[in-house]
Structure formats: structure tokens, C-alpha cells
Image: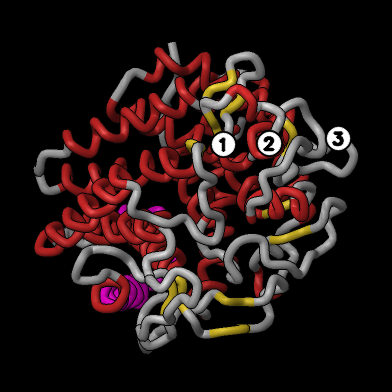
Amino acid sequence: MDYKRIRDFYIDGIENNLLPYWIDYADKEYGGVLNCISNDGKKLLSSDKFSWSQGRWLWILSTIFELTEQGVFSSVDMNLLSTLMINTFEFIRKYVVTNSYRCHFLLDRYGNVIPDDVYGRTDLSIYADCFVLIGMSSYIRVMHDEKNVPLADRLCVSIVKRLKSGDYLTEPYPIPSGYSVHGVPMIMLNTLDEYAKMRESFGLDSSFAVSLASKELSFILDRLYDEKRGLIREHASDDVNSLGRLIDRHVNPGHILEDAWFWIEHLERYGDLRERLFQIERIVSSTFSLGWDDEYGGLFRFVDCDGGMPHGDLICTPYEKLIAETWDMKLWWPHSEALYISLLLHKITNKECYEEMYLKTSSYVFSVFPKGADKEWIQIRKRDGKPEDKVVALPVKDPFHILRDYLKIIVRMDKCDTAD
């Protein structure tokens, strides 16, 4: 594969398409990003701010700033980027993180908390806390802002304690009683790795975070691994009578492909990738094959563990409703994740099958998604690739997955890693 050509393609995509689009929606007055945008990219529908998105935006800004310092990008305005980073961090520090080190889920443009009528609390999703910590950790590391390390420390400890005690929510999709889910250890693995990198950049001990991250990885690859099919289960119960339920049978291809590079990056930095590489390759190959739509192309949002439309007995949860209503949709983020994991595995193994996976994915992706207004992707599409005006989780247009995977690809194309 021509890695330089690939690298240049994604650099151009960021400099001339994605970053200019999102800078237009950066809140230059109050900090953060305004991303409650219509799927066609043409209209701002609300100025409300989900903390989930603000943390993600801060990670994107910090990573682009770091790579621009390294000479990767030549046309990025460093002064503007620095201002956006600082203002976003300050918005998060002042308005998102509470005195008890929990994160408000939803705020208005000015930082006022928007209360929730159902739960009577404002920390509605532990995922939001994790994305805030991911963004803060990257910002603190890139800006050499050691004075704010204690803030990240306290938020991290708070997240870990709440997960251990069960004092957390996962809105908009609560975890059913009696189930373990893939999403929580998955996000914790990535969060703890970003947090550990930040502490290490100041010469601080990271063993607490690294140890926890390694346990999360083991839980996923051992406890949630369906060895028969070579897949990761999104929901797992110890109840043998649950195996006929839809929630037990469904597979989320995008989640698995995204998490696969979390595993690889963690093992490269803190473990031994060779010990798990065969299993990881099997999971990625099985997931991609099961999730691919042979009729229209692209990855389904959800599939049954034996392929096709998810089916099984219901326990009547909001998440099951999501599966039933959106299983065959084509979303932006599984496809950007597939671009990165296929290139990553090709770079590591030099196997032709991953070049084929990348070419198959990229051919579909760049003929379907990047057709929005002002150079961004139309992120939500029907099975046949036509635009779909529908909320699939939060009512936002997301600034994270596409830019993050572009950035990851650019960095990886500069490396010369191969497995023995």
C-alpha cells in the first residue's frame, strides 16, 4: 500500500474539509462547540451543549494542535486553535465538572445546567464523564498544563469509584438489570490510557490507571468474548435462559471495530500485542464479515450474532427499541472506525486481507458519506445510502469519530510497525 499517498489524503481532508467546517461551529465567545446541527449540515438547531461532545471536541483540538506543532499540518492557524482549546477547557472546568467531580450532562450555551425531569440529577451518563476526562487529559498533556493535573486526577477517581459502587447512569440507554455491557469497559480502557499518557508526560506514576485499563481489556477479551463466533458480546448475562433474547444475540460491528484499536494501542504501550494478536485479528475479521451488507454495501448498525436482522425475545428496554428501529442504518462512525482498524492491522501484519478490507471500506465510504454541506459527511444514512433525518442517540452532529480516525491514520502512516 502507498502509505504516503494515504497519509496525504487524510491530511488534506482535515485541513481543507473537516476542520474548517467545525471551526465555523466553534463557540468563539463562550467556549466549546455548537453541534446540535441538522444531518445535512446546513442548520444549527439548538445552542445547547452536551458535555459528551465538549470533551470530544477538546481531544480533537488538542491532537490537531500537537500534530501541527510537529509539522504535520501546514495551513492550521495555531493561534486560533490555541484560543479554541483554552476556551473549551475553561468552559468544561467552570461549568461541566461539579464540586463533587461529576459531569453535568446537558447545559445551555452559556454554561447553565439544563435539569433532567426524569432522574432529578444532572450527571446522566458516565460516558460523558469519560469523554470529558479524555479531552481534559489530552489538553493538559499537550499544553503542559501541570497545574490542572489534580482536576483530572479527581475526576478519574470519581469515575472509578462510581463504577465500582454502581452510582452512575448511562442515558439515553440504561443498562438492563443483571447484565454486563461492552460499552463501559470499552470506554474505560480508552479513558484510562489517555489519562495515563497525560500523567506520564509529567513524569508522574500511571500504574493505577494502567492496571485498571489492563483489567478492562481482559474483561472484554475473556468475559465478553464469544469464542464460537469470534465476536464480542455487547450485553452479557450469567443467566443461561437469557441466550435467546434479542439483547444477548445482537452484535454492534462498529463498537467492536473501534474497540479493537483500543486493545492494540494499549497492548503496544503497556502489554504484549503478540499474545492477543491472533484473537484480535479473528474478532476483527469475523465482525467485519458479519456486519457487511452484501446487497448495498457498508456496515449495518446492528446484526444478529448469526447474521442478518437481530431477533430474539424482548425484555422491553429503550436499547432494544433502538436496535429494532435502526439496525440496518448506515452510520458514519462504524465506517470511519473500519478505515482505521483495517489500515492499522495492515501496518502491523502486512497481510493482504486488511488491504482488501480497507479498499472495500474506503470505496463505499467515499462514495456515500462525504456529500454534506460545507465539506462534512452526511453522517446518518438509510440502508441504501440515502440521507436519513433521524436522531440515533443524541440530537447532535458529531465532531469526533471521523476526525479522530483521520488523525489516527495520519500518525500511524508515519510509523513502520510490523509484527514478527
Circle 1: is it few (<14), some (14-19), or many (20+) Cα within 10 Å? Answer: many
Residue drawn at point x = 51 percent, y = 43 percent: 177
Image: magenta residue range: 70-91
Is 38 magenta? The answer is: no
Q: Is residue 213 left or right of residue 388?
A: left
Label disc, if present, on residue 250 of the rendered structure: 2
Q: How is the image coloured?
A: secondary structure
SS type, badge 3: loop
In the image shown, does 248 or 189 lie closer to the viewer?
Answer: 248
**Residue 160: image location, x then y, percent:** 27, 46
Ranked by sequence position, the earlier of labels 1 and 3 is: 1
Label disc, if present, on residue 375 of the rendered structure: none
Q: Is residue 15 visible?
A: yes
Is 89 magenta? The answer is: yes
- Corner quadrant of residue 115: bottom left
Q: Quadrant of the N terminus?
A: top right
Residue that label 3 marks? 294
In the image shown, does 264 or 214 lie closer to the viewer?
Answer: 214
Distance in Å between CA atoms under marks 2 and 1: 8 Å
**Residue 156: image location, x then y, percent:** 24, 51
Ranked by sequence position, the earlier of labels 3 and 2 is: 2
Q: Is residue 189 left or right of residue 12?
A: left
SS type, badge 2: strand
Residue that label 1 marks? 235
Residue drawn at point x = 41 percent, y = 60 percent: 128
**Residue 323: image location, x then y, percent:** 71, 48
Q: Are circles 2 and 1 on residues that touch, CB within 8 Å?
A: yes
Q: Quadrant of the C terminus?
A: top left
In the image shown, does 315 or 364 lie closer to the viewer?
Answer: 315
Placement of 290 over or under 381, stated as above or below:
above
Q: Amino acid at mark 2?
A: His
